Amino acid sequence: MIDTRNEIERRLSVLHGLELSGVNHAADMLTLSFGPLREVTNFKGALKYVGVWALHIQCAWRLEEAGRAVATEDDLRAPDEKAQAGTQRMQEVLLANGRAIVEAVIADDAGGATLFLSRGFWLTVIPDGKADEEDWRFFASGVDAAHLVIKGGAVAPESFD
């Protein structure tokens, strides 16, 4: 049996000390990059920049500072203009004034995780717990290796392929 909390903490421990290098979205999915950025060509042939590690969140999440919400998944589950504005606000607070650095990661048994960042920010990922629906994934960008996939609040079997 997989210990969800320990597996998440073990896999996300590589983020400790790395800077957050990108904040974006694809539809209502929050995409975060960590570590130095490098150029890659996407499947359409366009150049883009990716970090060493990527976190893609499709469930509930909340970015907080000093106990107040800075952004939530609702900012991306909106018309495109609002989603763009929410992403831009997160870029401004987490990247523009000196990039936030991952200081600690704590997971829970329900497939959630909290990333504690420098400058008093923290990001909490809250799985929806819906069976067979992906909550979030974590992976090394551009590397052909298994992703840590959380589905229905648990580590999915494909995380070990």
Image (cartoon, rainbow, N blue to C red):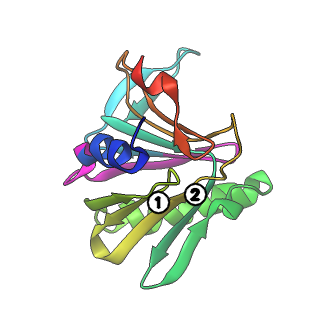
Q: Report which residue position mark 1 lands on.
A: 91
* The C terminus sits in image quarter: top left
As helix, strand or loop, the secondary structure at mark 1 comes to helix
Q: Nearer the viewer, residue 124 or 86?
A: 124
Q: State the image quarter where residue 60 is shown.
A: bottom right
Q: State the image quarter where residue 38 is shown.
A: top left
Image coordinates of residue 158 in percent, x first then y, are 50, 22
**Do callouts 1 and 2 mark residues in contact (Cβ within 8 Å)?**
yes
Q: State the image quarter where residue 151 is shown.
A: top right
Q: Is residue 125 above or below residue 32?
A: below
Q: Report which residue position mark 2 lands on.
A: 87
Write the start and end of the magenta stretch as one range: 14-31
Image coordinates of residue 154 in percent, x first then y, are 53, 42
* The N terminus sits in image quarter: top left
| 155 sits left or right of 145 in the view | right
Q: Is residue 1 above or below residue 89?
A: above
As helix, strand or loop, the secondary structure at mark 2 comes to helix
The type of residue carrying mark 1 is Gln
Residue drawn at point x = 19 percent, y = 54 percent: 17
The type of residue carrying mark 2 is Thr
Query: Is 52 colored magenta in this rendering?
Result: no
| 53 sits left or right of 72 in the view | left
Residue drawn at point x = 50 percent, y = 63 percent: 90
